[in-house]
């Protein structure tokens, strides 16, 4: 019986950690979208929900769907600026082509870092539950 409960905790524990890791990475990427300047995202802040917690409250698939929408919108804007149709775009006035490439490179680098993020380690809790300090002086 003990081995069965140990096996179940290992199976479900790993699955829960994978879910938490996926959620952490999605949240890091979402924060990056909100915190990046317009010159990197190419999307105005008015198109994002005003409260990022609105998106963060969704489950993982909901956050991933929102991020996919933003990537698709960014790709559309980016292709419109590179096409030579004669139509002017405000993004064309946001610096030189080289600076836009550099902003794109910075944005893609930070995206990759957010996608490779690891779970933050949680500090060990003390054995006391009533709030008393341990003899070493640490809570």
Image (tube, grey):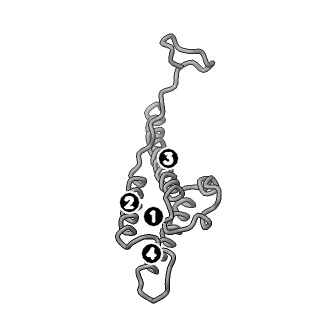
First reached walking from the N terminus: tag 2 or tag 4: 4
> Which residue matches tag 3?
20
> Which residue matches tag 4?
78
> Which residue matches tag 2?
106
Which residue corresponds to the image point at 40% horizontal and 64% vertical from the top-left? 103
First reached walking from the N terminus: tag 3 or tag 4: 3
Q: How many marks?
A: 4
Give coordinates of residue 65: x percent, y percent: 54, 65
Nearer the viewer's eye, disc 3 or disc 2? 2
Query: Relative to 122, does residue 52 appear above or below in the rendering?
Result: below
Residues 124 and 28: in front is 28
CA–CA distance in space, label 2 to label 4: 15 Å
Query: Relative to 41, does residue 2 appear above or below in the rendering?
Result: above
| Mark 2: few/some/many CA within 10 Å (<14, 14-19, 20+) | few
Give coordinates of residue 34: x percent, y percent: 54, 57
| SS of the residue under disc 2 | helix
> Which residue matches tag 1?
40
| SS of the residue under disc 1 | helix
CA–CA distance in space, label 3 to label 4: 32 Å
| SS of the residue under disc 3 | helix
Instruction: Tell me, yes or no, whether the two marked residues, 1 and 2, touch with CB atoms within 8 Å.
Output: yes
Residues 58 and 54: in front is 54
Instruction: Tell me, yes or no, whether the two marked residues, 1 and 3, touch with CB atoms within 8 Å.
Output: no
| Mark 1: few/some/many CA within 10 Å (<14, 14-19, 20+) | some
Which residue corresponds to the image point at 41% horizontal and 80% vertical from the top-left? 82
Give coordinates of residue 35: x percent, y percent: 52, 55
């Amino acid at each position: 019986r003990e081995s069965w409960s140990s096996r179940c905790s290992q199976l479900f524990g790993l699955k829960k950690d994978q879910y938490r890791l996926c959620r952490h990475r999605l949240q890091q990427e979402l924060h990056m979208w909100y915190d990046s300047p317009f010159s990197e995202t190419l999307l105005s802040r008015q198109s994002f929900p005003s409260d990022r917690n609105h998106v963060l409250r969704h489950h993982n698939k909901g956050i991933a769907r929102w991020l996919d929408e933003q990537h698709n919108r960014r790709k559309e804007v980016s292709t419109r600026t590179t096409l030579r149709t004669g139509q002017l775009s405000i993004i064309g006035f946001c610096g030189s082509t080289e600076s836009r490439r550099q902003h794109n490179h910075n944005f893609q680098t930070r995206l990759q870092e957010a996608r490779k993020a690891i779970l933050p380690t949680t500090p060990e809790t003390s054995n006391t539950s009533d709030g008393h300090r341990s003899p070493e002086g640490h809570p």
